[in-house]
Amino acid sequence: MEDLLRVEQLTKVYSFGSITSRVQLLAADNVSFVIKPGEIFVLAGESGCGKTTTAKMILGFEEPTSGTIVYKDREKVKHEKVWFTEAVQAIFQDPFGTFNPLRTVDRYFFETVQNYKPAQGEEAAIQFIDRTLRMVGLTYGEFAGKYPSEFSGGQLQRISIARALLTSPTLLIADEPVSMVDASLRMSIVNLFNKLAAELGMSVLYITHDLATAYYVCDRIAIMFRGNIVEMGGVEEVLMNPRHPYTQLLRESIPQADPAMRWKGRVNLNETEETEYLRQGCKFAGRCPAVMDRCIHEVPADIHVGDVLVKCHLYAGNGAPEQAEKIGLHGSFSTP
Ligand code: SF4
C-alpha cells in the first residue's frame, strides 16, 4: 500500500547560549517513519522527547534543519509554511485554546464551510454541520449559538474534532488530544479516533505521553527519547514485548493490575533533560540498567529485530540477548 505520509531523517537543531559557549541541541534526530492510509500511528514518549517538535515540522510550524517530509508524493519545500492541503488537519491539547471565548463555536464551522464549500447555501450547510457533529456524538441543536465556556472540555474536544472533519481530511494530527479531558471521558474520545479511522478511512498521527491510551488507539507505535525513535513497530509487539530498556521503563510506569507483573529491574536516577540531549553515545545511558561501556561513546544503530526497529547496542547481534530478556516485562494494560 502506498504511503500517505513519509518522514525521512527529519532533524531539528536548536542553538542556545552565548557566542563563546554555543550549545546545539538535537530536538529531533534523524526521525523516520511512514503512515499508511487508514492507519493510526502513535509517537509516544515523555515530555521533551521531540514528538511535538516532529509534529510541528510536519505541520509547517517549525522549519526542519534537515530531512524530508512527503505527503502523497508531494515533498515539502524548504521554508514552505502551508504546504499541505485541507486534507491534513490538526487537533491540539487544549480545546479551550482552540476557540476564541468571545465567539460562538458555530461561527467557526460556517466559516470553514464557506471557505471549503462542502455544502452550498445556509440550509445545506446546517445539515452538513449536523451530519459531521453526529460523527462525534453531538448535534447542531446542542451547539448552535453557544460559546466555548458553555461546553465541557470533553465536548469541546469533540467539537474540535468535528471542525477538523469538515474538510474531509485524509490525515489528522492529534497532539495529546485527551490530556486535558476528564479521565472519565478519555476513553470515549480515544475510541472516537478508532471509529473515525475505520469509518472514514482517515489516517491519524496521534501524539501522546500516555502508553495506555496509545495501546487502545493505534496500529503502530514509535517510542521517542531525547529526539530519537528508540523503538518502533506494531503496538502489540512493542508494548507487550518491549525490547528497548526505555520502552520497558515506560511500561513499568503504567499501573499494572497484577503486581507480579511489575518490573523487577532497577532504573538509575533521572538526569537533567539537557545532559541527556547532549550525550555523545546512547542518550539513555545515564538511566539504563543494562548500560555497557560502548553505550557511553557510541551511538547505537537502528536494528531490526523481527518486524520491530530497536535503537540499542543490546541487539547488535540482531537477536534478543539474555540481558534484554532479563529486564523485560510482559503483561496486560489496565484502562486509563
Ligand atoms: Fe541501554 Fe546501551 Fe541500549 Fe542505550 S544502547 S538503551 S545504554 S543498553
Image: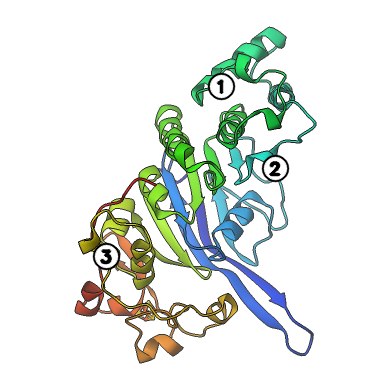
Residue in view at x 57 percent, y 17 percent: 139
Left or right of residue 332, residue 131 in this image: right
Left or right of residue 99, residue 73 in this image: left
Dot 1 crowding, Cα within 10 Å, few <14, some 14–19, many 20+ = many
Q: Quadrant of ligand 1?
A: bottom left
Question: Given the image, on which type of amino acid does mark 3 rest?
Answer: Arg
Q: Quadrant of residue 296?
A: bottom left
Residue 31: x %, y % from top left = 51, 64
Q: Nearer the viewer, residue 152 or 235?
A: 152
Q: CA distance from mark 3 to mark 2?
A: 38 Å
Residue where numbered disc 2 is placed: 97
Q: Give the mark nearest the N terminus, 2 or 1.
A: 2
The vertical placement of 188 against 46, above or below, is above
Residue 334: x %, y % from top left = 31, 49
Q: Nearer the viewer, residue 217 or 144?
A: 144
Residue where numbered disc 3 is placed: 262
Quick check: can you spot residue 319?
no
Q: CA distance from mark 1 to mark 3?
A: 43 Å
Question: Is mark 1 in CB contact (under 8 Å) with mark 3?
Answer: no
Left or right of residue 244, residue 164 in this image: right
The vertical placement of 57 against 35, above or below, is below
Residue in view at x 23 percent, y 79 percent: 323
Dot 3 crowding, Cα within 10 Å, few <14, some 14–19, many 20+ = some
Residue in view at x 43 percent, y 48 percent: 41
Nearest to viewer (mark 2 / mark 1): 2
Dot 2 crowding, Cα within 10 Å, few <14, some 14–19, many 20+ = few
